[in-house]
Image (tube, rainbow, N blue to C red):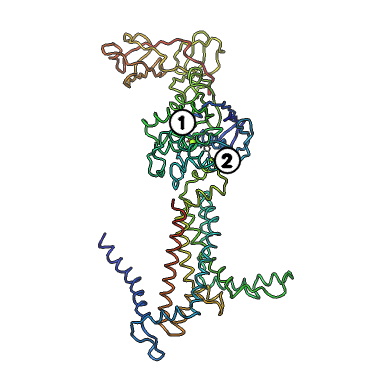
């Protein structure tokens, strides 16, 4: 048990930078998700924590100790690999017992702890099977039990759910989260699925091209993204390039003037206005009245998505699907609409 | 498909089984100094071969050398095969070609090279004497040592390539998982890599062992007149002694010994690691 601290962690491969200057603290018992597009350095970061990759610069501290130069077997991390990496020649119980054997835990204690761990992941009835005789989800849970049974100081997961189907993914996600909370494990999880990150982690780290863009809770990242990349990556967002025009609002490149509270921002500097699609209200308007025209309507069940041309700027609007009989239900592409939003909901962000 | 398989199958049978059957038949005939061979149905050639202490010792030598070479190949080949299997792609093909390179040179030419290296006037002895480290030349050639060195050099590539093909199939992540769970490199090797590589160890050992049991050119050229293995002994009977029946019996004894040892060895390896 302990906390995990990364200090200016960097990995370069020749000229290319895989991870650059990553600072991060994962507190005791906390679950932090590394989130970002493919190739942004999530796996590299995780593998530096486990010790499989030697950093080019920076430090990894586990429970206060600098482990940057320690080999993987002396680090006390428990890792769940994307491919599970079970030992195919050992039974489920032998797989789970491996880490305890390495720690020279006596036979009787080992057996109780293995069964306990297998019960935790509800696989005690399959203890004698070989990994090849299990389904993907069961293998996944063996991998979890194998990493958990040794009580690692840091629990590491690299896209643990990517090989599971959608339904199982939801279940295992909850299972991992509740185990992690029950055992108070300091956890770093890698994912490129934002829903996964939002539902599982206490805090999220959004990475892009090797760098940390923002660290925060799901709410912080969603409500107050620091830059357009984070705004666009966490949830959907209209990102409109242009310039603030004092109290008047924000002048989009396409010419539209969008209401927002940007009085503080200096006139003339470029910026990006971030406006969440569900913060925009939509109403039918008489033809010729108002500046907005509906371009597309997509029915998504509970919600309906509208694409609106707002005086030359294309905006996505998401609303709860109106009930049968509501005039909004009959809107079709080409119709005139009126858009309104709380100016405070539109956030001005620095240009990329 | 069957139309293609049938003629091919018949050809294989003809090429592989027919000579064996012929040889088996000959081994039961009798030798006659005047007529070469007399038709018979007797096991006397086998009985003679088994009872003759000379041929018993030749068979024993053959088995010991073959076993020794196989173990040596395993010890030398495993690390190399592992290194090759885990190599990054660009250098891998080059390394593979380098490992195969010795096979481009025939056994006889290669043995000539060993003679030039190991002989009394060879490079090693000349160098040692030049440095005044030794007075008389070391006996490096025309003995078991030279034969083992020569055979290992021939068969090692087979062992390495067989092993590395199997090791490549072991995901690196299983090794990482072992390390992550606290296994030091040697423990990870013993508990994870080796058991998963056992099919390769078995296949490579069987292949190399059979090649060693049947080695001909290397024992003849590097072993000298005193050192005898089975394949040259068979040849001697056929060509020098003109005693085909006895030669054929020796050949079958060699075949039988090879088969028995191979089966016993595979069974031992299998039992040790099947859990
Ligand atoms: N051995 C290597 N040599 C050179 N470049 C590498 C190496 N390993 C990774 N990289 C580069 O480092 C960057 C980060 O890779 P990493 O595997 O950490 O990405 P990731 O965030 O895990 O992506 P994904 O979501 O696709 O798994 C990538 O651009 C990758 O091409
Ligand atoms: Mg990855």
Q: Under 8 Å from ligand 1: the CB of mark 1?
A: yes
Gap between marks 2 and 1, in whole Å? 25 Å
- Can you say whether A178 is above or below A306 in the image? below
- Can you say whether A233 is above or below A310 in the image? below
Is label 2 in contact with label 1 (beta carbons under 8 Å)? no
Residue B245 pos. (x, y %): 39, 82
**Residue B164 tag number:** none
Q: Chain of mark 2?
A: A
Q: Residues within 10 Å of mark 1 (few under 14, many from 20)?
A: some
Depth check: give the residue in front, A160 or B187.
B187
Q: Is residue A17 visible?
A: no
Q: Under 8 Å from ligand 1: the CB of mark 2?
A: no
- Can you say whether B149 is above or below B241 in the image? above
Q: Residues within 10 Å of mark 2 (few under 14, many from 20)?
A: many
Q: Is residue A302 left or right of residue B133?
A: left
Q: Is residue B42 left or right of residue A25?
A: left
Q: What residue does disc 1 label?
A: A192
Q: Nearer the viewer, mark 2 or mark 1?
A: 2
**Residue A72 tag number:** 2
**Element at label 1:** loop
Tell me the quadrant of the picture where the N terminus of chain B can be found.
bottom left
Residue B12 pos. (x, y %): 33, 68
- Can you say whether A48 is above or below B260 in the image? above
Q: Residue at x 45, y 10 (%)?
A: A342
Q: Chain of mark 1?
A: A
């Amino acid at each position: 048990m302990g906390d995990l601290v990364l200090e200016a962690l960097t990995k370069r491969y020749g000229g290319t930078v895989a991870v650059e200057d990553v600072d991060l603290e994962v507190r005791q018992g906390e679950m932090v998700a590394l989130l970002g597009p493919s190739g942004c350095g999530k796996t590299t970061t995780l593998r530096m924590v486990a010790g499989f990759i030697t950093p080019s610069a920076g430090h990894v501290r586990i429970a206060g100790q600098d482990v940057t130069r320690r080999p993987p077997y002396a680090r006390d991390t428990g890792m769940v690999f994307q491919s599970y990496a079970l030992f195919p020649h050992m039974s489920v119980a032998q797989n789970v017992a491996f880490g305890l054997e390495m720690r020279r835990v006596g036979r009787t204690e080992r057996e109780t702890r293995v069964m306990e761990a297998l019960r935790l992941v509800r696989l005690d009835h399959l203890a004698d099977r070989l990994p090849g005789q299990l389904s993907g989800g069961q293998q996944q849970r063996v991998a979890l039990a194998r990493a958990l049974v040794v009580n690692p100081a840091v629990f590491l997961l690299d896209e643990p759910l990517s090989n599971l189907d959608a339904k199982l993914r939801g279940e295992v996600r909850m299972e991992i989260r509740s185990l992690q909370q029950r055992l108070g494990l300091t956890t770093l999880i890698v994912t490129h699925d934002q829903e996964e990150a939002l539902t599982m982690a206490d805090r999220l780290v959004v990475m892009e091209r090797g760098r940390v863009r923002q660290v925060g809770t799901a709410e912080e990242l969603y409500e107050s993204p620091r830059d357009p990349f984070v705004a666009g990556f966490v949830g959907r967002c209209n990102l409109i390039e242009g310039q603030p025009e004092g109290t008047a609002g924000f002048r989009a490149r396409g010419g539209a003037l969008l209401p927002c509270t940007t009085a503080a921002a200096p006139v003339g500097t470029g910026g990006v206005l971030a406006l969440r699609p569900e913060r925009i209200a939509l109403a039918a308007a008489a033809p010729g009245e108002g500046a907005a025209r509906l371009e597309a309507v997509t029915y998504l069940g509970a919600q309906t998505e509208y694409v609106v041309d707002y005086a030359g700027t294309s905006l996505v609007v998401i609303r709860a699907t109106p009930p049968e009989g509501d005039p909004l239900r009959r809107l079709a592409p080409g119709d005139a609409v009126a858009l309104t939003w709380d100016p405070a909901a539109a956030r001005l962000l620095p240009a990329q | 498909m069957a139309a293609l398989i049938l003629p091919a199958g018949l050809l294989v049978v003809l090429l592989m089984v027919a000579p064996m059957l012929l040889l088996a038949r000959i081994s039961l005939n009798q030798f006659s100094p005047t007529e070469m061979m007399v038709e018979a149905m007797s096991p006397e050639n086998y009985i003679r071969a088994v009872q003759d202490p000379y041929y018993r010792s030749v068979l024993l030598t053959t088995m010991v050398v073959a076993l020794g070479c196989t173990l040596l190949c395993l010890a030398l080949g495993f690390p190399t095969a592992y290194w090759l299997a885990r190599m990054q792609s660009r250098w891998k093909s080059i390394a593979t070609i380098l490992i195969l390179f010795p096979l481009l040179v025939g056994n006889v030419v290669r043995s000539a090279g060993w003679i030039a290296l190991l002989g009394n006037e060879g490079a090693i002895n000349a160098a040692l004497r030049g440095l005044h480290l030794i007075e008389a030349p070391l006996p490096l050639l025309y003995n078991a040592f030279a034969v083992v060195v020569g055979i290992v050099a021939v068969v090692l590539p087979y062992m390495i390539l067989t092993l590395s093909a199997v090791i490549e199939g072991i995901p690196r992540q299983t090794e990482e998982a072992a390390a992550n769970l606290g296994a030091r490199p040697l423990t990870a090797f013993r508990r994870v890599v080796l058991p998963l590589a056992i099919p390769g160890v078995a296949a490579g050992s069987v292949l190399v062992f059979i090649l060693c049991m049947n080695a001909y050119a290397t024992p003849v050229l590097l072993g000298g007149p005193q050192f005898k293995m089975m394949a040259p002994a068979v040849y001697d009977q056929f060509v020098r002694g003109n005693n085909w029946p006895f030669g054929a019996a020796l050949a079958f004894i060699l075949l039988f010994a090879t088969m028995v040892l191979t089966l016993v060895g595979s069974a031992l390896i299998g039992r040790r690691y099947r859990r």
